[in-house]
């Protein structure tokens, strides 16, 4: 495969599309599929054939606004239809090229206008399983540019210059990680894509893998070239069957086109990728645990150093990045590190994809420039809290993150600002809560999650999270005293300081952040035996002071 | 090292050939353990003692290690599933949207706690830690099929249909 051949393919796709007056894109991401958008696609195709209109019907990945599904997007008019049912099909076809159907049209300008799409630029626009669609939108161009015109060091320089930081949550500078693996000595090196999106309430990786899988493969191949690896693994949750099946198809297509395999792009570079299925363990998102799992073992983390960059999979130098990190690579190589660095805030560059869910009108997937205020995401893009309720908190970072109250909505989204506020960027879950959520109960929910997911290797995490859970349960049912609260705070410090891996080190965050911003709610439960949100069932009677 | 002869298939059941196929594809390497257990579960619905024993022996892995892996990962089940499975997502978005009430209502209706199967073997009630369809919360999977914005009534109606089948 050469750049000329890519151009040829892109041209023939354009010619093919040119035969039609309209493109009807039907979202077939998980959210819309659960509302039978596959049947809708078939109905549309049938109706188009019957009407004799020159329109193509295309299956696409996620269009983002899952709450309004099934979604249909009409090109070139740029009309988005929401809640489309099979009985709307004829109306949609009738209105092609005319005024849009008013009762179906989705006019959420504030939702879309503030977003900047880099990672999601192809999501909802291409058929994820069609490699030609991807190539027609500059796909695999970056890989061939890197292989033909750039040295591995040159690739790493661009990534470093871009300021890209790990999108899995840690925020480690990607360029630095790549150069460490590139410098490591080894006859064999590996590249791993971490698609073990275990954080409950997050589905960015799932959407990217389902909507634009080739982009992830391209990012991995460029990474492999840069660090000198020839073998890659994508570790995906078994709970994501659609992502797995689309990836499998895409791997086969990429091999068939010579984009994976030996002598890629007529160069000496060889690279292939295998899929590994996760089996439901949150701790496997931790890199050393993930490596153990690929090796077929229990997913328990190891102390670092040695870091995987030096001794990873089967003791060889290994590069591990998250799905979204790899998805950023191709555009950086195509447009340059400086272009990427021009987007975002001072120390957090580019964009971030968030799964915006919970008590929010426009729930779904959004991609925003770093530095954007939380308020703009929640109230602007998200449309605020529905049903006339009031906003209470936004939770970022999942079980490792924290809850931020209304007074923090002015905060700009970046790794450092979120950390300073007591939460973390995390992988991108953003859950909005209204006044019907009890913050003590929320903290207990996350601690229960960490307790069940603790791998049991180190005591602070294994026993600490269990004790934290017991104390929080006591607070929730009204049987706790102020001494219990002091003990809980003390324990949070121990678990944070003494745990082996990220799971335990961050498990107290939901408790600490709710204590920081919602301490009064804890005290209400303990002293007045009352749950202000009316969530917890309090058994203990109020103690009457003599 | 002398080549070890792999153990004979546990029975005539053709599904063992599929399991064996996964191991062969991976050259009977030890790291194929999780992959193979996935194949066992997708072929048989769960992992029983015979299966774990057979896989461990074939891959030359100590039985304790194979059992350790089978029990470490939540996705693997050591008990046979019921005829129908209702999986309620208890991820954060679903929790915020009141999935705990769904779990309670379902437990009350089928008379077993989550993670268990009714004594007549008809319905398994499971929970999942986020299936990644948070935009449609609360989410329930009925025999693997995803349903968003699930109401308690709708869920109970499905359980009712299964129970009288």
Image: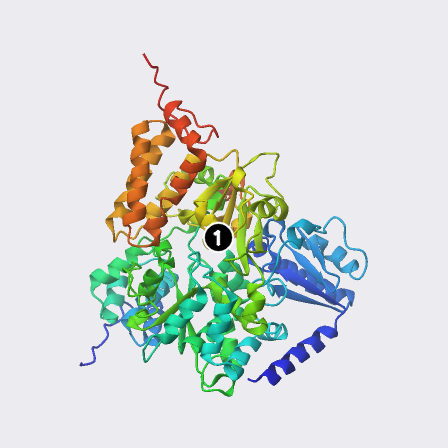
Residue A23's x, y, as percent? Answer: 71, 66
Q: Is residue A27 visible?
A: yes
Q: Is residue B124 visible?
A: no
Residue B20's x, y, as percent? Answer: 32, 72
Q: Nearer the viewer, residue A490 or A236?
A: A490
Q: Is residue B5 left or right of residue B103?
A: left
Element class at badge 1: loop
In which quadrant of the rendered view does residue B29 lie? Answer: bottom left
Q: Provide the residue designation for mark 1.
A: A202
Residue occupying the far top of the picture: A546
Q: Is residue B20 left or right of residue B152?
A: left
Q: What quarter of the picture does the C terminus of chain A occupy?
A: top left
Q: Residue at x 48, y 52 (%)?
A: A202
In which quadrant of the rendered view does residue A366 lie? Answer: bottom right
Q: Residue at x 41, y 75 (%)?
A: A227
Q: Is residue A238 left or right of residue A299?
A: right
Q: Nearer the viewer, residue A82 or B36?
A: A82
Q: Classify B71 as above or below A452.
A: below
Residue A414's x, y, as percent? Answer: 50, 53
Chain letter of disc 1? A
Q: Residue at x 63, y 46 (%)?
A: A380
Tell how many labels: 1
Q: Nearer the viewer, residue A345 or A466?
A: A345
């Amino acid at each position: 495969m050469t750049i000329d051949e890519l151009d040829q393919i892109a041209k023939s796709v354009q010619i093919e599309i040119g035969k039609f007056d309209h493109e009807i894109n039907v979202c077939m991401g998980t959210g819309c599929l659960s509302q039978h958008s596959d049947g809708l696609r078939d109905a549309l195709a049938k109706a188009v054939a019957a009407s004799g209109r020159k329109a193509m019907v295309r299956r696409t990945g996620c269009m983002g606004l899952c709450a309004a599904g099934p979604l249909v997007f009409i090109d070139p008019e740029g009309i988005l239809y929401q809640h489309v049912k099979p009985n709307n099909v004829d109306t949609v076809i009738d209105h092609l090229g005319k005024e849009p159907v008013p009762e179906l049209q989705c006019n959420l300008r504030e939702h879309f206008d503030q977003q900047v799409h880099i990672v999601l630029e192809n999501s909802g626009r291409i058929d994820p399983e069609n490699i030609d669609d991807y190539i027609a939108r500059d796909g695999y161009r970056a890989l061939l540019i890197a292989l033909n015109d750039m040295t591995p060091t040159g690739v790493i320089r661009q990534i470093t210059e871009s300021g890209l930081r790990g999108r899995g949550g840690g925020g480690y500078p990607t360029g630095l990680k790549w150069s460490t693996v590139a410098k490591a000595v080894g006859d064999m090196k590996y590249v791993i894509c971490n698609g073990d999106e275990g954080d409950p309430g997050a589905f960015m990786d799932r959407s990217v893998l389902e909507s634009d899988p080739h982009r992830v493969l391209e990012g991995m191949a460029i990474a492999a070239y840069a660090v000198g690896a020839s073998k890659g693994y994508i570790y995906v949750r078994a709970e994501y069957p659609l992502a797995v099946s689309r990836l499998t198809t895409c791997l086969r297509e990429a091999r068939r086109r010579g984009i994976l395999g030996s002598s890629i792009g007529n160069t000496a570079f060889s690279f292939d990728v295998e899929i590994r299925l996760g089996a439901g363990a949150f701790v496997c998102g931790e890199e050393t645990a993930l490596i153990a799992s690929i090796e077929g073992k229990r997913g328990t983390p190891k102390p670092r150093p040695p870091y995987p960059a030096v001794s990873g999979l089967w003791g060889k130098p290994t590069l591990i990045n998250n799905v979204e990190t790899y998805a950023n690579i191709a555009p950086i190589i195509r447009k340059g590190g400086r272009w990427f660095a021009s987007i975002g805030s001072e120390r957090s560059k580019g964009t971030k994809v968030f799964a915006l869910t919970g008590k929010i009108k426009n729930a779904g997937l959004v991609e925003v420039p770093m530095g954007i205020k939380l308020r703009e995401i929640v109230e602007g893009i998200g449309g605020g809290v529905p049903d006339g309720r009031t906003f209470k908190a936004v939770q970022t970072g999942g079980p490792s993150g924290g809850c931020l109250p209304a007074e923090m909505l002015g905060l700009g989204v970046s790794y450092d600002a979120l950390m300073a506020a007591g939460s973390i960027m995390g992988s991108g879950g953003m859950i909005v809560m209204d006044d019907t959520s009890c913050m003590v109960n929320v903290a207990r929910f996350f601690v229960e999650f960490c307790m069940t997911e603790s791998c049991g290797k180190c005591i602070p995490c294994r026993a600490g999270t269990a004790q934290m859970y017991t104390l929080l349960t006591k607070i929730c049912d009204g049987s706790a005293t102020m001494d219990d609260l002091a003990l809980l705070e003390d324990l949070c410090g121990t678990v944070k300081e003494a745990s082996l891996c990220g799971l335990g080190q961050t498990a107290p965050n939901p408790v600490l952040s709710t204590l920081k911003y919602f301490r009064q709610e804890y005290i209400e439960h303990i002293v007045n035996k009352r749950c202000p949100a009316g969530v917890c069932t309090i058994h203990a009677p109020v103690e009457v002071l003599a | 090292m002398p080549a070890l002869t792999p153990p004979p298939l546990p029975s005539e059941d053709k599904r063992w050939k599929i399991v064996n196929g996964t191991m062969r594809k991976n050259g009977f390497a030890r790291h194929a353990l999780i992959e193979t257990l996935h194949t066992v579960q997708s072929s048989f619905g769960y992992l029983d003692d015979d299966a774990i024993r057979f896989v461990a022996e074939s891959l030359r892995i100590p039985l304790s290690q194979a059992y350790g892996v089978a029990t470490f990962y939540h996705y693997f089940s050591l008990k046979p599933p019921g005829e129908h499975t209702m999986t309620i997502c208890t991820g954060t978005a679903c929790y915020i949207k009141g999935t705990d009430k769904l779990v309670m209502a379902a437990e009350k209706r089928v008379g077993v706690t989550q993670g268990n199967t009714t004594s007549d073997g008809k319905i398994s009630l499971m929970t999942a830690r986020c299936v990644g369809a948070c935009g449609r919360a609360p989410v329930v999977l009925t025999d693997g099929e995803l349903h968003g914005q699930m109401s308690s009534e709708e869920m109970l109606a499905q359980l009712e249909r299964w129970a009288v089948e």
